[in-house]
Amino acid sequence: MPPAADTARLLVTETFGPTLQGEGPNLGEPALFIRLSRCNLTCQWCDEPHTWDTSRFDLQEHTRTHTVRELSRWAQTHPTELVVITGGEPLLHQQQLVGLVDALVAGGKRVEIETNGTIAPLPEIRGDGVRFNVSPKLASSGVSRSRRYRPEALSALVEADSICKFVVTTAHRDADLAEADQLVTEHPFRQVWLMPEGITEPVVRTGLRLLADHALVRGWSLTPRLHVTIWGNQHGH
């Protein structure tokens, strides 16, 4: 890794783990998490608003600056193979992420980058050992379509190693599913997941029951939020 990449600095809300990946194709797998600060969207049901919402949080109080070297060394102190880079929106920082991803993969880690699908990833972070968990935001997020839907970014992510995951709200289930259908028609991700919105176990469980048949009829997968079931909405899990 070039020296400049090694000393690149990232805005970090928290690092935690080993814990269990609570969502998607690696559900239940031990994982380390690096949560980056800042986001380009403002979803009304966001469960990590302290990464972006300046109207409710002092972001400086929730942000630390770490170098790529510090983060990669932290990850290498654990035998856990999977490292999840989440946010916020990690691809806001992708120039700095190049060095971190390179270091993690070189150290034998597998990297998942969670993204809202509005920013096309650089070629430098689309290599072996990196998968993008793409969660396009739907109208129920409260974000305007012009901000949350960037077709060129989604097209680039379809071509990368990626899966697509839609957060579906109970109150707007039919509209959410119709929008998800349209998006997958236009951007044919190879793997698609549905996940109920919710930060309590009863709400998530109800959402799973309501979504199960919809996932089956489409040939899509269904994911719970395992961390909510186990730990509730606590940070650091």
Image (cartoon, rainbow, N blue to C red):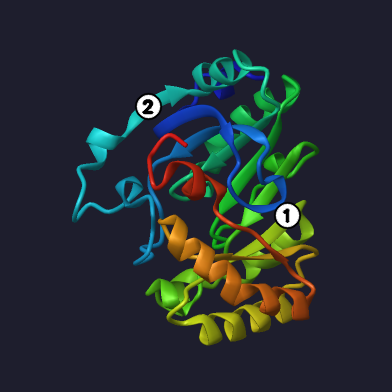
Pick the front one: 53 or 23: 23
Q: Earlier in the sequence, mark 1 or mark 2?
A: 2
Q: Position of residue 17 (x, y in %)?
A: 53, 27
Pick the front one: 235 or 55: 235
Q: Looking at the rendering, in which quadrant would you find the N terminus?
A: top right
Q: Secondary structure at mark 2?
A: strand
Q: CA distance from mark 1 to mark 2?
A: 28 Å
Tag 1: amino acid: Ser
Q: Position of residue 9 (x, y in %)?
A: 45, 27
Query: Which residue is painted at 23% across and 34% down in the image?
Result: 61
Numbered disc in front, either 1 or 2 = 1
Q: Secondary structure at mark 1?
A: strand
Residue under numbered circle 2: 65
Dot 2 crowding, Cα within 10 Å, few <14, some 14–19, many 20+: some
Query: Can you tell which quarter of the image residue 195 is in?
Result: bottom right
Query: Which residue is painted at 37% across and 50% down in the image?
Result: 48
Q: CB under 8 Å between callouts 1 and 2?
A: no
Labelled disc at residue 162: 1
Q: Is residue 103 left or right of residue 90?
A: right
Tag 2: amino acid: Thr
Query: Which residue is painted at 77% across and 40% down in the image?
Result: 127
Pick the front one: 143 or 10: 143
Q: Is residue 226 above or below residue 16?
A: below
Query: Which residue is painted at 32% across and 34% down in the image?
Result: 63
Q: Position of residue 217 (x, y in %)?
A: 76, 81
Residue 138 makes an appearance in the image: yes
Dot 1 crowding, Cα within 10 Å, few <14, some 14–19, many 20+: many
Pick the front one: 25 or 115: 25
Residue 123 makes an appearance in the image: no
Q: Is residue 156 above or below residue 172?
A: above
